[in-house]
Image (cartoon, rainbow, N blue to C red):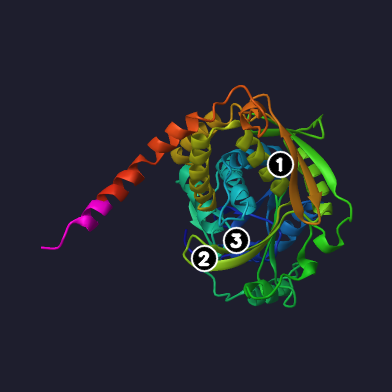
Amino acid sequence: MHKQTNGRPGTGPLVVLAYSGGLDTSAIVPWLRETYGARVICFAADVGQGAGELTGLGEKAKRSGAQDCIVEDLREEFVRDFVFPTLRAGAIYARTYLLGTSMARPLTAAHQVAVAQRLGADAVAHGCTGKGNDQVRFELTYAALAPELQIIAPWREWQFQGREDLINYVRAKGVPVQATAEKPYSTDRNLWHCSHEGGILEDPSQEAPEHIFVMTKNPITAPDEPVIVTIGFEEGNPISVDAVPLGPVELLEQLNEIAGEHGVGRADVVEDRLVGMKSRGVYETPGGTVLYAAHRELEQMVLDRRTLRLKDELALRYADLVYDGRWWTPERETLDALVTATQKNVTGTVRLKLFKGNVIVAGRESPYALYQPSYATFGKDNVYNQKDAEGFIRLYGLASRIAAGLAAERTDVPAS
């Protein structure tokens, strides 16, 4: 698609923009009109970012110059088809990041593509920077689902040098935004988490200021009494809280509220971006932190040692896949099939105690538990012959004894 050299804005190609109403996408709408003469349709995915971000979004998009703004409620699909599979896989990136933004992007991009195809659009656009991971997540989805669509990535084209330039630009266009030069944070919220980047957070030696947190209480001021929460699972999927069956969205909302009240789920992460640099992000994942802890404990009860080791290895690959934007690939489908096979007995309940930012295991039960008290007890039993350990240890240490014996023989050979 060629940049506009003459003519009126809004009379050219049809572009569907992944729109949040934040600083970047607020600037992109008028920029697309001015630069390409584009007719802009904004697409926004409701993945649980809250009414504060969605209320008035359509009016704001049109005020920026868009012809329309389409908002789709994707919360159920997000939790059921993206969050829960990643949870079952045990995928965690950079040891602590629970992949909230990473999971939402391929879903948003897929529905953006569907809108573009339905409207006969010429191109799709996104507001991701040329330094970040999201550009890859969006564009790999476009490539997998709609390779015929052209891609416009303004951050790789325009002359703005940073967020301060964007703030000045949108102000000149009369578009209100929350970002200011004093609080230039980039935040991304959905049902699973809220991420915070930019500003003082770009200095990893500085503690994150308390005012940025929106989903979790300060653990210091959290309640002085713990709360016990019981989570039920069926084949690896969370299905209940405190014995009350809940759908995916309701379950996560309830856990977010409980865990957030007790200061659970904060993570300060220096991570490796896909493009090669390290960056610092601060994440809040209250309900997700509780679910990961419960799921891990239940797996520990029902899976044998070698299957657990295989799961741990798969978790690293799955985390890289999600983080790197390779969701719509045969690789992910294959990993999902393997994970599903490991989850058929991950059914039961786990009790957790939440207290001032801590998640403490308070009990777990499963009809498929491999834990047998009659074998594990330190008391009297009738099932385990302790003398059997003697032969086991002799065979288990055979290689060590052979190596030690040969080393001794070589030491005893006199020098010639």
Decide: marks 1, 2 in contact (CB < 8 A)? no
Residue 177 percent location from the top left of the image = 75, 67
Alpha carbon of mark 1 to alpha carbon of mark 2: how far? 28 Å
Q: Is residue 92 left or right of residue 220?
A: left
Residue located 49% across and 33% down the image: 389
For label 2, the SS is loop
Give residue 291's quadrant in the image: top right
Name which of mark 3 and mark 1 comes first in the sequence: 1
Depicted 235 relative to depicted 91: above or below: above
Numbered circle sitting on residue 127: 3
N-terminal of the pair, mark 1 or mark 2, is 1
Residue reaching furthest to the right: 224
Look at the magenta stretch and give its main secondary structure: helix
Q: Which residues are magenta?
A: 407-416
Q: Which residue is mark 1?
A: 75
Residue 412 painted magenta: yes
Q: Which mark is residue 130?
A: 2
List x then y, in percent, for residue 205. 64, 75
Q: Type of residue at label 1?
A: Arg
**Residue 2, placed above or below residue 165:** above
Nearest the viewer among 106 and 337 is 337
Q: Are marks 3 and 1 in contact (CB under 8 Å)?
A: no
Q: Residue at x 48, y 53 (%)?
A: 150
* Residue drawn where x is 71% and y is 72% of the image: 207
Mark 1 neighbour density, 10 Å: few (under 14) some (14–19) many (20 or more): many
